[in-house]
């Protein structure tokens, strides 16, 4: 078993909204480096097809149920993994994001758009596939692809096994029960042992129920989503499938995120030349209009500005941070109220707090390199990538101990310092007070250079590459294949 169809609603660099886009860019390539014949299937968004004028049609699919006819295009590769794009202009050649229109409202036909993607993935994994290449595993990612296991269950003859990767359980693809027929699903599937979810239809619930194996993006998050609170309505089903559920920590692109080779920052460095990090701090202070110098610890944030990310706690800390010898540089966009609150905070504390609303890849790299410490006070965080970037850049993270943050950041105390495992700071209680107390602890450590260098060295020595994670995914695929033959 060496063939995997990796199905994603996002296709970097053209369509990407978060961690799933990063995984789509990196994991298939890492699997291929491990001798797994991996191909990527994604929607044929207009921006992607325009950037890939050499795409050629390799298959056509007739209209079915409420789905229109569509084409499958072979369109080059994603970091070395062959790319297949589902060309359906009325579904995917639109303005806005993968999931929303230009006003950030969900497309009303998302059930059809991603139902079609799921159905084509299942066809390619079945005996009905028009392609000579046939996957052994259909690897689905989040709710937009999670109906594929249900369609595979309906397939006649031999077919691929399915694995569903849960990147964020809070997005479940829940639609009205009346969507069952337009999606071409039989009434028998609208049951508790099927796609039904509290009287509605859920793509993600369907995937969790029908897939041979379930993966999520960190070991701690795998445990959290089996609880009533963390399961967000699916905890019971996930507990029932705990034998088939595993948490595999996401990796990062260690070529792109490497301070020794990063041309996006003001000055490259490694641990042996970490004094050069101060050049990046100065450049960052200038970029954000902050007071220049080393007298204050500079805290950085690169985030979607949302309640989930604990950004409201950062806003609430504004006054307290103004009374501490620290500076704050924030880059992100999201909830309008938080954008406005942060902007007002920067105006109130000019020279101490700087805010850039939006996203800038170059600036994100400079924040990781130029800050002394990085804030990620998330209420929940399935995996998180920025804390791994921060560790690699010698920028100890300050995080809430949840999900992947708990799996990657070891809180600095006497015991962990002595053991040589400390690499940052974490807190458990979900509150602004706990965040402030942890910032104070980090400030004390920053003022003790030997302790700070110890944290930096440990973080920079860790391996967060995709190679180990790819091997664990391969083990999951093999287990899923074994189960299918029981």
Image: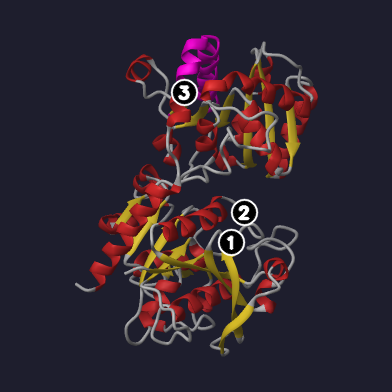
Disc 3 and disc 2 in contact, CB within 8 angstroms: no
Against 99, is 124 above or below? below
- Name the quarter where the N terminus is drawn: bottom left
Residue 145 position within the rendered picture, expressed as x and y whole percent measured from the top left: 49, 68
For residue 259, what is the image quadrant?
top right
User: Residue 280 versus residue 147: which sits nearer the camera?
Assistant: 280
Left or right for 238, reference 81 = left
Disc 2 and disc 1 in contact, CB within 8 angstroms: yes
For residue 117, what is the image quadrant?
bottom right
* Principal secondary structure, stretch drawn in magenta: helix
Residue 398 position within the rendered picture, expressed as x and y whole percent measured from the top left: 52, 27
Residue 461 position within the rendered picture, expressed as x and y whole percent measured from the top left: 44, 30
Left or right for 69, reference 2 = right
Q: Residue 10 carries which label?
A: 1
- Name the quarter where the C terminus is drawn: bottom left
Q: Label 3 to label 2, Cα distance in Å?
A: 32 Å
Q: Mark 1 packing: few (<14 Cα in 10 Å), some, or many (20+)?
A: many
Q: Which of marks 1 and 3 is nearer the N terminus?
A: 1
Which residue occupies 33% across, 52% down?
246
Asked whether the viewer can see residue 151, the reply is yes
Which residue occupies 63% across, 21% down?
276
Q: Which mark is residue 17?
A: 2
Residue at which label 3 appears: 457
Q: Give the range drawn in magenta.
A: 428-457
Residue that protrudes farthest toward the bottom in the picture: 62
User: Helix, strand, or loop for circle 1?
Assistant: loop
Asked if residue 447 lies in the magenta stretch, the reply is: yes
Against 477, is 309 above or below? above
Q: Mark 3 packing: few (<14 Cα in 10 Å), some, or many (20+)?
A: many
User: Residue 10 versus residue 402: which sits nearer the camera?
Assistant: 10
Q: Earlier in the sequence, mark 3 or mark 2?
A: 2
């Amino acid at each position: 078993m060496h063939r995997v169809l990796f199905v994603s609603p996002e296709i970097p660099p053209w369509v990407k909204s978060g961690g799933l886009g990063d995984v789509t860019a990196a994991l298939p390539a890492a699997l291929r480096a491990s001798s797994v014949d991996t191909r990527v299937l994604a929607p044929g968004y207009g921006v992607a097809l325009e950037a890939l004028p050499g795409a050629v049609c390799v298959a056509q699919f007739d209209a079915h149920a409420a789905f229109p006819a569509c084409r499958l295009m072979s369109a080059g590769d994603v970091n070395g993994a062959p790319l297949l794009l589902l060309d359906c202009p009325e579904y995917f050649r639109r303005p806005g994001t993968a999931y929303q229109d230009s006003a950030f409202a969900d497309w009303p036909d998302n059930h059809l758009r991603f139902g079609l993607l799921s159905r084509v993935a299942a066809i390619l994994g079945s005996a009905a596939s028009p392609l000579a290449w046939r996957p052994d595993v259909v690897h689905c990612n989040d709710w937009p692809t999670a109906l594929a296991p249900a369609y595979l269950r309906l397939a006649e003859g031999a077919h691929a096994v399915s694995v569903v990767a849960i990147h964020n359980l809070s997005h479940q693809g829940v639609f009205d029960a009346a969507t069952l027929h337009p999606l071409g699903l039989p009434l028998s599937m609208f049951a508790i042992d099927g796609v039904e979810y509290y009287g509605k239809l859920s793509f993600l619930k369907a995937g969790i129920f029908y897939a041979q194996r379930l993966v999520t993006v960190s070991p701690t998050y795998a445990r959290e989503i089996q609880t009533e609170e963390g399961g967000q309505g699916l905890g019971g089903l996930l507990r029932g499938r705990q034998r088939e559920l595993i948490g595999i920590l996401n990796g990062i692109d260690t070529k792109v995120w490497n301070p020794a080779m990063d041309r996006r920052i003001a000055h490259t460095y490694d641990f042996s030349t970490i004094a050069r990090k101060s050049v990046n701090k100065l450049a960052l202070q200038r970029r954000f209009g902050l007071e220049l110098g080393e007298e204050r610890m500079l805290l950085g944030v690169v985030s979607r500005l949302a309640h989930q990310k604990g950004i409201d706690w950062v806003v609430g800390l504004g006054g307290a941070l103004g009374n501490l010898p620290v500076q704050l540089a924030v880059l992100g966009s999201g909830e309008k109220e938080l954008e406005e609150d942060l902007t007002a905070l920067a105006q109130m504390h000019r020279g101490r707090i700087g805010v850039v609303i939006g996203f800038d890849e170059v600036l994100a790299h400079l924040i990781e390199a130029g800050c002394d410490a990085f804030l990620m006070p998330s209420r929940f965080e399935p995996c998180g990538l920025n804390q791994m970037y921060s560790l690699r850049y010698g920028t100890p993270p300050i995080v809430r101990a949840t999900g992947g943050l708990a799996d990657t950041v070891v809180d600095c105390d006497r015991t962990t310092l002595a053991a040589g495992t400390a690499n940052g700071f974490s807190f458990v209680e979900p509150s602004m007070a706990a965040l402030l107390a942890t910032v104070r602890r980090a400030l004390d450590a920053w003022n003790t250079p030997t302790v700070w260098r110890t944290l930096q060295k440990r973080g920079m020595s860790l391996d967060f590459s995709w190679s180990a994670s790819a091997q664990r995914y391969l083990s999951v695929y093999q287990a899923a294949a074994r189960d299918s033959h029981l």
